[in-house]
Amino acid sequence: MRNVPILAIFLAGVIHLAVAPVHYTHAPAHGIFFALAGAAEIFWALAFWRRPSTRLYYVGLAVAGGLVILWAVTRVLIQPFEHEPGPLDAGGLVCKGCELVGVVMLAILALQGRLSGVEKRSPLRLVGQPLAMALVVGVGSLGMGYGLEPYLPTLASQEEPMSEMPGYDHAALSSGATVTLGQLQISGAWARPAQMGGTSAVYLTIVNTGEQADALVDVQSPVAESAEVHEMRMDGDVMRMQPVARVEVAAGGRVELKPGGYHIMLMGLTRALAVGERIPIVLQFEHSGQVAVEATVTSP
Amino acid sequence: MRLVLLALVIALTGCSQPYAFHGTRLEPPLTLPDFELINQDGQTVRLSDYRGQLILLFFGYTHCPDVCPTTLAQFKRVRAQLGKQAERVRFIFVTLDPERDTPAVLKEFLATFDPTFIGFTGTTADLEAVWKSYGIYREKRVEGSTYFVDHTARIYVIDARGNLRLTWLLDANLSTDDLVQDIQHLMEG
Ligand SMILES: [Cu+2]
């Protein structure tokens, strides 16, 4: 029975270590933190398994509990070294589930006096004290992260925050409405789900309500090493794809980027694109200038 | 009486138009060599393992940005429309990019569409033989730090006896209904 919480925390440590490299690519500070946290949990689990003690009991609850608190707080507050709160992803939930199971079971076993090596003490000392310690660890590491961030800019996320992009219109984007750029209206942007390092395609519709023709001449996205407009073309039996330098949008006209036609190709994805996420795309037009839109990752 | 019946039969058969396939029919059906590749679970499989079922064979690659995901999404809709009949149909995706499409990559890619889809990969030499026998054109095009593969966009239908019966060219006019009608006709015939 005693081994279940130890195994749960060991597993949480393994998950932390496994995802550290991915986190390192989006923000090096997170990668380093995940590696340290994972190593600490694995080290603790092995130590407590071999020789449980009262002191180690407190350390385990403080570390695992602190990580759960840190995780919960950063789902709401902006994470240190990042521009936004963290996602509620499956990996994170499983990892936190393990830690929570570990912490709660350890506390219960200690209260029942069934943890050999751990002294039986009052509930206040066995539960209240580690809870306070976990709070200190969780909030303290968050504060330390915020404090260190200005001094270690190279460890921060290199993804440009959406809100600093030219033409960013938060109200329009969050309402899911059409983004307007002068006489152009851009709507219905969606992207295909893809793995990190892979490729994705973005589709959208451009309507020109004005009397002057315009053209899409460049595209960019912070989630891809490079982005280009491509066209699919049937050549006999063969489907060919080629880059196009510009997509003309006639006065009063409408151009749809859609499967089998034009798409914005995202190459060398710096992270995986999961269904439901929204990713920023910057469009550069010949006359109207630049605008940022958000594409929703959708499985067609 | 017999004459009346005979006249009725002739009238009925004469009236019913022969079914017009949306795809290109192979008459007589073509017998292509069987092949052995690796599926997305890393197991060695032969195409003939699926004998007795209708096979929809599609050649593509997981880094394919447009046609391949579009086709697999359409396969998913075909499967849904077929309902219970779908149990007698197998959807097989054969890679054109063995360099990047390992069994694990194929598995993750296909799972985003339908876990019942089957993925085939293997050594380049083994795959080349398969591409050749199906007349697949494949051209690797390097762009920046990555590459794409221009390729034949056809779906191949292999019947329960293992013969190639029908192919569909993937153009914008090919609808899910077209595929479902052709499949149902092949299963009845
Ligand atoms: Cu493309």
Image (spheres, coloured by chain):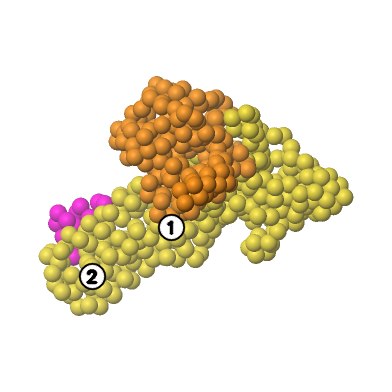
Tell me if B102 is positioned left or right of A25 in this view: left
Nearer to us in this view, A28 or B83? B83
Q: Which residues are magenta?
A: A41-54
Q: Position of residue A80 (x, y in %)?
A: 49, 57
Q: Residues within 10 Å of mark 2 (few under 14, many from 20)?
A: many
Question: Residue most toward the right?
Answer: A211
Residue carrying label 2: A107
* Secondary structure character of the magenta stretch overall: helix
Q: Position of residue A287 (x, y in %)?
A: 81, 45
- Labelled pair 1, 2 in contact (Cβ < 8 Å): no
Residue drawn at the location 57% of the way across and 35% of the way down: B169
Marker disc for residue A41: none
Residue carrying label 1: A89
Residue B76 at least partly seen? no
Chain under callout 1: A
Q: Look at the picture and state if B4 lies above or below B149.
A: below
Residue B133 at least partly seen? yes
Q: Which chain is yellow?
A: A
Nearer to us in this view, A223 or B177? B177
Tell me if A193 is positioned left or right of A49 in this view: right
| Three-letter residue code for mark 2 | Ala
| Sooner in the amino-acid sequence: mark 1 or mark 2 | 1
Residue drawn at the location 41% of the way across and 31% of the way down: B163
| Three-letter residue code for mark 1 | Asp
Q: Look at the picture and state if A227 lies above or below B5.
A: above
Q: Say which colour chain B has.
A: orange
